[in-house]
Image (tube, helix red, strand yellow):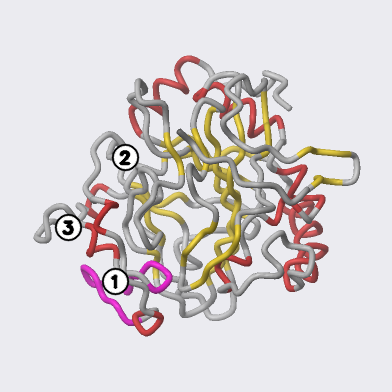
Amino acid sequence: MSSNEFSLSPEQIAQFERDGYIGPFDLYDPAEMEQHLRALRPKLISTKKSIYSDEKQASAISNYDRHFDIDFLASHVTRPEIVDRVSSLLGPDTLCWRSEFLAKYPGDEGTDWHQAEDFSSLTDEHTPQIQWPADSDRRGTITVWTAFTEASVETGALQFIPGTHKEMNYDETKGLSYDPDVINNLEKQGTNRGFFGYDYRQLQKDPNWAPDESKAISAVMKQGQFIIFWSTLMHASHPNTSQDQARLGYSVRYLPTAARVYPGLTELNEFGSTVSLARYGAVLTSGEDTFHHNTFVQQTVNGYEFPVREIRRSA
């Protein structure tokens, strides 16, 4: 839970509002992170304890929400070094609604430039996965991306175009067509870029528009560092052009408790797979929930309790 020890300064908050991202920040010493990673690898391979383990799933979805079944990740999503900074931006009452691993192996394409406002583009009926209150001018989610391995330009570091988080260049209601054959087969502005089987150009409001990559920065990170950014910020990643170094990032997404998570959804359709949300729950990371329109898991000394429940539908 939040301690306020690591809260952002007013100057840092202003920088984040201007640029759409801030960091990187130190969290784990590289040697410590490497030790955690060695212990993690066999647990990540086995998805038997994952809340989606009994579903037909693609590898991408099997990497979702492993903080529910792996103790180290459960601790990670609530680390005060992260949560205090997130609370500085979202307010005192926050939740974690998703976590996912993002691996990039030698020869893998760069991740396409994209923005995400409500994460509806990947669902079959283009239903929002997150929903801010109607009277809020906020959209998107805050993402905390931690480098579980070193993230260099060569291995596939993140890229941002600063200040692009306040205007959406994409229309998520258009939806994306999943095609595994396009993976590593799309070249854009001289770089091999895709989106895990999707082509983000399908969502462009202007089909003739292209991101101004001359303004892009590379978010190079040491192993164990993390960076914070709005999902509405234009972001991408470099291809992994190394010979033998994999890049592993862990992305954790946060919202204020006032926002709704998976409103009206009983299942998640992404990357050619469908998983039930019957055992899903958000994690309260700071403050309290006074809205009672989201389902939360109960954190215990042994992890989380996941009673099968009826999915609450938003009004």
Residue topped by disc 2? 162
Lateral position of residue 29 relative to residue 157, left or right: right
192 and 222: which one is in front? 192
Mark 1 or mark 3: name the one nearer the start of the chain: 1
298 and 109: which one is in front? 298
Is 195 magenta? The answer is yes
Disc 1 to disc 2, C-alpha distance: 20 Å
Lateral position of residue 270 relative to residue 279, left or right: left
Q: Which residues are magenta?
A: 185-197
SS of the residue at dot 2? loop
SS of the residue at dot 1? strand
Depth check, mark 1 against mark 3: the one in front is 3
Work out whether 273 lies above or below 151.
below
The disc at residue 210 is 3
Depth check, mark 3 against mark 2: the one in front is 3
SS of the residue at dot 3? loop
Residue type of the residue flagged with mark 1: Thr
Lateral position of residue 202 relative to residue 112, left or right: left
Residue type of the residue flagged with mark 3: Ala
Q: Are marks 1 and 3 in contact (CB under 8 Å)?
A: no
The disc at residue 191 is 1
